[in-house]
Image: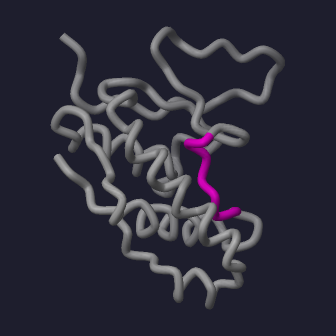
């Protein structure tokens, strides 16, 4: 039986790091990467922004106040829909990222929590509401 919540795997910086079977890498340049750069916002704040963004608690005005231009905001909204529409792929899967295992701040944990909460396939409609 597949576990409901996968686990976070620390990706090693060595050459050709092999991912375990069924695991997904969630860093750049994948669509599952955190679009809020840790270098710009700090690690913890970038993870908090990512969580709020996926929960649709980070609107266009807030993103504009954070320095995003309208084209970037539009791109972020399309990316959010893509991530949420494909969250079912992560149910029970392990996710690999660069965050240290000791860190309590990791966007992979947000994705793992969303995948664990997903009951079947989630679909985001044209008004960006999650339909269970």
Judged left or right of residue 127, residue 39 is right
Q: Looking at the rendering, which quadrant does residue 100 occupy?
A: top right
Q: Looking at the rendering, which quadrant does residue 11 occupy?
A: top right
Q: Residue at x 56, y 31 (%)?
A: 96
Percent across and percent down for residue 58 are: 45, 76
Percent across and percent down for residue 95 are: 49, 31
- Comparing 59 with 104, the one in front is 59
* Secondary structure character of the magenta stretch overall: loop
Q: Residue at x 33, y 65 (%)?
A: 127
Magenta highlight range: 31-37
Judged left or right of residue 1, residue 83 is right
Q: Residue at x 54, y 56 (%)?
A: 78
Percent across and percent down for residue 16 are: 78, 14
Point out the image quarter for the N terminus: top left
Residue 108 on the magenta segment: no
Percent across and percent down for residue 93 are: 38, 24
């Amino acid at each position: 039986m597949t576990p409901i919540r996968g686990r976070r795997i620390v990706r090693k910086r060595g050459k050709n790091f092999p991912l375990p079977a069924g695991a997904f890498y969630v860093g750049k340049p994948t669509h599952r990467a955190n679009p809020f750069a840790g270098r710009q916002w700090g690690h913890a704040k970038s993870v908090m922004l990512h969580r709020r963004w996926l929960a649709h608690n980070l609107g266009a005005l807030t993103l504009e106040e954070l320095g995003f231009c309208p084209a970037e905001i539009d791109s972020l909204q399309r990316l959010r829909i893509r991530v949420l529409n494909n969250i079912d792929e992560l149910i029970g899967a392990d996710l690999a990222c660069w965050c240290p295992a000791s860190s309590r701040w990791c966007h992979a944990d947000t994705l793992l929590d969303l995948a664990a909460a997903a009951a079947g396939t989630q679909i985001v409609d044209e008004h960006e509401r999650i339909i269970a």
